[in-house]
Image (cartoon, rainbow, N blue to C red):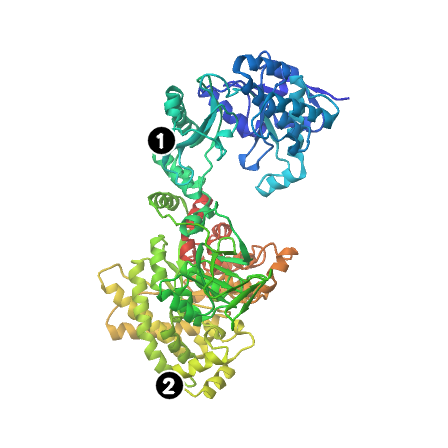
Amino acid sequence: MQKHIEIADFIVLDPVAPVAVATHGGRAKCLQRLIRLEMPVPKTAALSFATVRAIAAGERIDTDALMAHFGPAPLVSVRPSSEDPDWGGPGAILNIGMNEARHAEFANLLGYEAADRLFARFIQTYAVQVARLDPDMFEANGDVTEESVSAMLDAYEEETDEPFPQDPARQLADVLRAMARAWEGTSARLLRQARGAPADAGLGLVVQAMAPGFGPAESGSGVIQFASPETGLPQVTGRYKSQSQGREALDPEAQAAYLTRDPRGISLEELCPAAFADLIRFGGICRTRLREEMQIEFTLDGGRLSVLDAVRIPRSSRAALRIAVALAEDGVITPEEAVLRIEPRSLNELLHRQIDPAAPRTMLADGIAASPGAATGKLVFDSATAQSYAARGEPCILVRRETSPGDIRGMHASVGVLTERGGMTSHAAVIARGLGLPCVVSARDIVIDRKDRAIQFKDGLRLGEGDTVTLDGTSGQLLMGAPHLLEPALDDAFRTLLGWADAARDIGVRANADTPAEAEVARAFEAEGIGLCRTEHMFFEADRLTVMREMIFANTAEDRAASLERLIPMQVKDFTELFRIMEGKPVCIRLFDPPLHEFLPSNREGMRELADALQLPLAAVTRRVEALAEFNPMLGMRGVRLGVTMPEIYEAQARAIFLATIAASRKGREPIVPEIMIPLVSARREVELVKMRVDAIAAAVRTEMGAEFDYRLGVMVETPRAALRAQDIAQHAAFLSFGTNDLTQMTYGLSRDDAGRFMNAYVQQGVYPEDPFHRLDFEGVGELLRIGAERGRACRSDIILSLCGEHGGDAESIAFCRAAGFDYVSCSPFRVPVARLAAAHLAL
Ligand code: PEP
Ligand code: MG
């Protein structure tokens, strides 16, 4: 037997009714607040999650009693009230209670036109949303007339074998059941779970007396808001439409009036100045009392204003930030609350150009979103062409199978980079993030025809050099043509908010910056220093690359000394510049770590170029490249292994660092204390050897130059062994910086450069929850971080701990580092603001 739920299962809203977001949903709670603020809200009743759940399960509530609350022969609306408005809910149903008797009354009162429209609209909604009939049969074509209403009633009867229900209480019961069941449907559940709703999320329903919006004196409906949804700046916008209800005024086709006076047409301000003034006042009250910029939904009935609802203004990331800062500056919320209201990831949209969300997209291919932002340009397939496009001022997108240092100039000259291979930490990805260029790697289903300079797409389309495309590094897509892009916005509000974030956070944020240009970005984004300067990246420019290659190529110590002679002055200049730009903030310089495959030519063309540059016979170059070639360059002669086997290289770099320290310190600034970091360590003895030599160079430079300086020597923990033996390694290290790119590579035994090829299959089949080069593997790699930190600290309690892999800018990794007691994280300069905000969220 169906049980009647007690009338107490709905609550008529008044200032003290016991409604809460957790039991009745956000809309019910907000309406109660509006009532408390003495706004003219029509009579409203709220049904709790429990009641709606029971209705969905087949129980009935006493809708006669519920209807009776709204006076004799009322019209009511029902709207969803979920806990979080983002979880969605069934569409509102208006004009419940409309029947033939009411139609006749309205015809007398408001005229036939209004009465027909009200009835037609209700039959249509009821037929489609409640009786689940085919929407096509109830489409109102052209003007609504008495005949079309009759036709709809006939169609209803035809389809359901019963006349259209006339009893308002029965109508309401049916509507409530339909909405309650819609919420339980599989697609609705999946949709809200995708938006973060828990599996058992409840739905409340709000039943409200209708203010019809039709009638002889000024009647209609609209929405008004007091800040721009795009910019967040104070601005009254919205739409109002005479003789309308619901959200009709928002229909772009609707002949809506403006709200404020507008030369383009009639406005609400002119039509009904008193109601307009009230709305402005209500907006101010919402802002201070609800502590939020609200959009108000309202109706006018014969000039009488009703407030039906108020919701947070939907807003762009840019607007969200401005609104939060303005509310805090006006004392409505605290700065801490403003900080918490902004989702760190949303800052990405402000730091880079992005595709206008309203613009249509034609996707050509997708891959790994390796560096955010969007750019439009013409396709080019090699660096030389990219440079000639740049020289002509034509933006271009560089497409390569993968990139290597030889492509750096081309990358600089391009506005975006697409590669067929690679992963989150491959060369193209790391460099593009440093440059702030949009980048997509491991693009699927494309074939690059290098000879023909074209991309062949799966569906048969072929694009060639000079064709215009848009690369969206935020979503990992390549798009056809030039959709509209939005510019980045680093305004005062942005700086203010991040200033508040800095005051709150308790873990440092530095930047990975290799060149003066990147250091400038790091400083502009207020990084607390440089956490990783990859010195080999300072030699990616074509004219310098030769010097680096010459050094790698040197057969004898004398030859190497000759190329180092040329290299030192360049490094002194580089480091002096970095120290100057960072204005006394710490700068951590990593000694060379050039994986040989990144610096050696891989094809005949490259060998020929190198032979030319080094003025050597081609055969000699080929022989030497073969002799140096490694099966696993990432596990080969890199990092400290270079320092141990060819000590003069690190000695030269140390000398350059100390000379730059003296030069930069002399300029009347705070003395610089450089940090020198040894890469790819796996044994204590490696550190001892390098330390001994660096100490000796420091002593020599002090004597030579007659100058004093200090420095700190530290170790990069990038091999599992370094983490496990951190207690030995820390003996000679003032700091340990965890390089999670290599540490992930070596913990999984997974090549950074090749994993992109099968990562999709691995993630799709649930082997990895996500690409571990993208999202730190807290269980495995994280365990090594914890062990390394603990053992390092056990050896030296004042040891400075940090993370400088590509994971450093990610909120979850920052939370992990903070929990493990790290001192700072270091990430690409463009990710510094996101990291600062994410760190503040953790501390608040
Ligand atoms: C790392 O391995 O995490 C790191 C920061 O160094 P690189 O990416 O230069 O190998
Ligand atoms: Mg590394």
Residue 220, labelled with which disc? none
- Are there few (<14), some (14-19), or many (20+) residues within 10 Å of tag 1? few
Q: Nearer the viewer, mark 1 or mark 2?
A: 1
Q: Nearer the viewer, residue 835 or 311?
A: 311
Q: Is residue 163 left or right of residue 9?
A: right
Residue 488: x, y in percent? 39, 50
Image position of 764 with respect to 267: above or below: below
Identify the element where label 1 is drawn: loop
**Which kind of residue does numbered mark 1 sit on?**
Asp
Residue 224: x, y in percent? 43, 29
Image position of 143 with respect to 738: above or below: above
Q: Nearer the viewer, residue 698 or 41?
A: 41
Q: Earlier in the sequence, mark 1 or mark 2?
A: 1
Residue at point 57%, 37% (across, down): 87
Identify the element where label 2 is drawn: helix
Quarter of the image for residue 178 reads top right
Q: Most extreme residue toward the left, as rendered? A: 668
Specify the quadrant that holds the N terminus: top right
Q: Is residue 647 left or right of residue 19?
A: left
Residue 262, labelled with which disc? 1
Residue at point 47%, 45% (across, down): 842
Residue 164: x, y in percent? 69, 21
Residue at point 24%, 73% (across, down): 705
Residue 215: x, y in percent? 50, 18
The residue wearing badge 2 is: 558
